[in-house]
Amino acid sequence: EVQLVESGGGLVQAGGSLRLSCAASGFTFDDYAIGWFRQAPGKEREGASCISSSDGSTYCADSVKGRFTISSDKAKNTVYLQMNSLKPEDTAVYYCAAKEGVRPELAVEEYAYWGQGTQVTVSS
């Protein structure tokens, strides 16, 4: 059974940092790409960043480039999202998701497996 468990969300002031973790199990880590998505109240779910577990190649949305960094630890089957210089508009529920295939991309419909989400709130 595929499981994705996020952790690390919380409340932070604007300009602060948080690191989210996504612990994956139930599938061969190297055969999947892992993405981080977010959904703010009243808005559609959007992609933030993703990584190919196979070769470590990454892709980031323009809205987070230069501020968010995605990485993975194959030994722990865990993907991280380091978020720096946080802004109030980054406030959302953050989800990690997995898709078969190693090409990193941020199309929501390509991801079959989703975690339960973790809340990130950035105060101004």
Image (cartoon, rainbow, N blue to C red):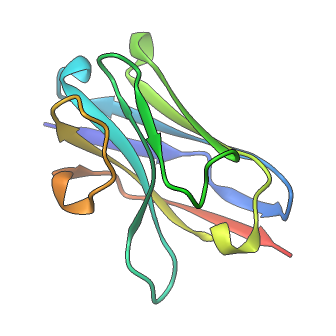
Question: As displayed, is residue 44 above or below residue 59?
Answer: below
Q: Quadrant of the C terminus?
A: bottom right
Residue 36 x, y percent position in the rendering: 43, 49
**Residue lying farthest front?**
62
Residue 46 x, y percent position in the rendering: 41, 66
Task: Please tell me which residue is depicted at 67% across the width and 74% down the height of the picture.
Answer: 89
Task: Please tell me which residue is depicted at 26% across the width and 42% down the height of the picture.
Answer: 98
**Residue lying farthest top?**
75
**Residue lying farthest bottom?**
42
90 sits left or right of 45 in the view: right
Question: As displayed, is residue 1 above or below residue 115?
Answer: above
Q: Quadrant of residue 4?
A: top left
Residue 40 x, y percent position in the rendering: 52, 77
Question: As displayed, is residue 13 above or below residue 3?
Answer: below
Name the one closer to the observer, 24 or 65: 65
Q: Quadrant of the N terminus?
A: top left
Residue 58 x, y percent position in the rendering: 44, 33
Task: Please tell me which residue is depicted at 18% across the width and 61% down the height of the picture.
Answer: 109
Q: How many marks?
A: 0
Question: As displayed, is residue 79 above or below residue 67?
Answer: above
Name the one closer to the observer, 95 or 83: 83
Q: Quadrant of residue 87?
A: bottom right
